[in-house]
Image: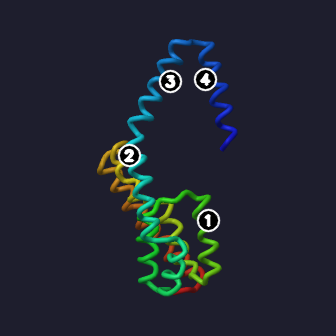
Amino acid sequence: MRFLYPIAIVLVIISAFADRKKTQQSLKLAWKKFFSILPGFLTMISLLAVITLIFPLEKTGELLTAHANWLGLLIALSIGSAIFVPGFIAYPLSAVLLENGVPYYIIAGFTTSLMLVGFASLPIEIAYFGKKTAIIRNVCGFFLSLLISIVIGFLYGEF
């Protein structure tokens, strides 16, 4: 990811040499867009911090292990839907859950809902995609996570 920054800087410099005025206009527009996104982004980060305080990731594994049934799956899907986590955090977290004895189908539901559903990011999605599209995307993500976890449960013989 870090290699993208130098590439972007070089491309902006090349653009400035090609047409200084258009480059300045585009940078002003980008800065303006950044500040229009910032309040929603800060709200999302704050909401994620509060959710993480309510559901500490260490306690999540204990909770999911204690309820290794349909209730556990619904808890996993709910927690995963409330917290939005990128893959580079979700996969190691899933490994920790697996080491703690959480069944594969619950880990599958938790992990996929972590990345497919984002109620914490819903205000930003509504701002960019519209209310209907954002809600449809999150509901479809939730049911897709449920379907994936059920398939994993059958494949691993956990049902």
Residue type at mark 4: give it: Val
- Which circle, 1 or 2, is nearer the viewer? 2
Which badge, 3 or 1, comes first in the chain's sequence?
Answer: 3
Q: Which numbered marker is on residue 27?
A: 3
Q: CA distance from mark 4 to mark 1?
A: 35 Å
Q: Amino acid at mark 3?
A: Leu
* CA separation in Å, label 2 and label 3: 21 Å
Q: Is residue 3 left or right of residue 157?
A: right
Determine which of the numbered discs, if any, sits on residue 40 in the image.
Answer: 2
Q: Identify residue type, mark 2.
A: Gly
Residue shown at 53% from the left, 18% from the top: 23
Discs 4/2, front = 2
Report the Cα–Cα distance between label 4 and label 3. Answer: 9 Å
Question: Could you say which disc has been placed on residue 91 in the image?
Answer: 1
Report, in whole angstroms, how far the alpha carbon at label 1 lies from the one at label 2.
Answer: 26 Å
The residue lying at 36 percent from left, 44 percent from top is: 129
> Mark 2: which secondary structure?
helix
CA gap between label 3 and label 1 equals 36 Å
Name which of mark 1 and mark 2 comes first in the sequence. 2
Graded by Cα atoms within 10 Å as few (under 14), some (14 to 19) or many (20 or more), the crowding at tag 2 reads some
Q: Secondary structure at mark 3?
A: helix
